[in-house]
Amino acid sequence: MSFHSQRSIVILTAWKVIATMLQPLLKPYLWYRCKKGKEIKERLSERMGVVSLPRKSGGIIHFHAASVGEVISIFPIITELYKIEPRQKFLVTTGTVTSSQIVQQYFSNDPELSKHVQHQFIPLDVPKWVERFVSFWQPSLSIIVESELWPNLIDAFNKHQVPIALINARLSDRSFTTWHRFQRTAFALLSKFDWIAARSLQDQYNFEKLGVKATYLGDIKQIAPKLAFDMQELNCLRELFKNKPIWLAASTHATEEIVIAKAHEALKTKWPELITIIVPRHPERSKEIIEQIGQMPQRSLNQLPDEKGLWLCDTLGELGLFYRLCDIVFIGNSLDSTSKGGGHNPFEPAKLHCAMASGNQIHNFKEAYRLLEEVVTITPNVESLVTWVDEMLRDPQKRDKYAQNALHIMDQQSQLAYDIASHLYSLKA
């Protein structure tokens, strides 16, 4: 055995030892998270691998998706797997309270499929806890989404001879630089997967540079269901803003709101009744935003826009509402002013008939923006943003053409869910 191979074993073994030693401290940590509202008290034991549901009979396919976006993206794949085998059972694990609520909400709309789906919180990566989890559920296949690489959980699946797949696998250039320093360890961990489906061609290339085989079929966020919304609320807002020019700055990050406010002021000289809606990615930043650009009505306080026209919609889970309300959308986390940038998912507004713009810092969604490059306008600064919004407001036909073309591109991706589901089904033990 080479020195590098020995070192990779040492690193993975060290993680196992450290996780075991930390076990007594993790229980109070979970209780702390519970007090902060980040865990559900009645289900805290699930985070230690103690199940709270009886196992349904028959083969179970396990999906693990950490965040809300990842959870939403697996729903079409579960539906396709269910079509392939109507007796198939599913276990979905998540790491956040919000994600668990999304799972329950989505499947409650399909009573028949919901009988086949169970949800649990994923246990923390402590050997004893993940062993308890895997030995109870004994899935015929485990599917991990994006980058949830927990060594002890992966080891437990291998020990129980459970095939595992990594779908929408992410390995950005920045992450590759880190992983490359521990290439043997990365290879030792990733080679335990039976199938890796990369999120993009660049991610696939980075995996293969590590010596790991990966395929590329497409980004599963392309096929995620449209974001949910409240129809009654949408009708109320449409009536409120009837005949008024309106646009949306979605998922903004620190300092981007300053640029949006400047754009709003410039546009107000041409469009006196303009409504500019700001939806920050993290609503808890509302105080910081107001300190930076001044007082404005907040949706979280049930306030409506005043004569200034700026409206801070600092609420969670309402992007689906605002994408339907506004067909002129700037997608945040993409301007040079942000600390890291990287962009956000453009597929969500593309599916909802929106003309879209973004800054030029979109490295986390390169493939998505490449797919949509003909329908997304890059506006790297306030001047270009003002020009674009003004053009979209002045030319409804052009705006509609961009939105329709985006919809057409998204419709062409509908086969992806079936392609991924078919390959996954072939991996079952």
Image (cartoon, rainbow, N blue to C red):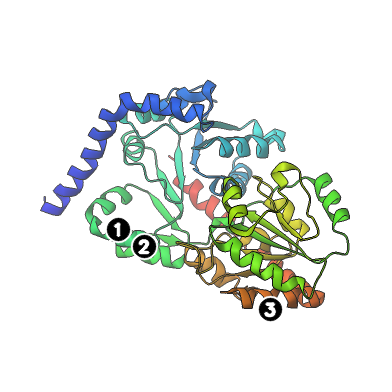
Q: Earlier in the sequence, mark 3 or mark 1?
A: 1
Q: Quadrant of residue 177?
A: bottom left
Name the kind of residue labelled 1 in the image.
Thr
Q: Quadrant of residue 373?
A: bottom right
Considering the image in quadrants, where does the C terminus appear?
A: top left
**Residue at the disc numbered 2:** 174
The answer to whether residue 414 shows anywhere in this view is: no
**Residue at the disc numbered 3:** 387
Instruction: Tell me residue 416's x, y (percent).
Output: 58, 58
Q: Is residue 161 left or right of residue 120?
A: left
Residue at 61% across / 32% down in the picture? 116
Residue at 39% across / 24% down in the picture? 28
Crowd tier of the residue under label 2, counting other residues whose Cα lies within 10 Å: few below 14, some 14–19, many 20 or above: few
**Residue at the disc numbered 1:** 178
Crowd tier of the residue under label 3, counting other residues whose Cα lies within 10 Å: few below 14, some 14–19, many 20 or above: some
Answer whether labels 2 and 1 touch (C-beta < 8 Å): yes
Circle 2 — which element?
helix
- 130 w.r.t. 305: above or below: above
Q: CA distance from mark 3 to mark 2?
A: 33 Å
Q: Earlier in the sequence, mark 3 or mark 2?
A: 2
Of tags 3 and 1, which is closer to the observer?
Answer: 3
The answer to whether residue 1 shows anywhere in this view is: yes
Q: Is residue 271 left or right of residue 80?
A: right
Closest to the observer, 396 or 195: 396
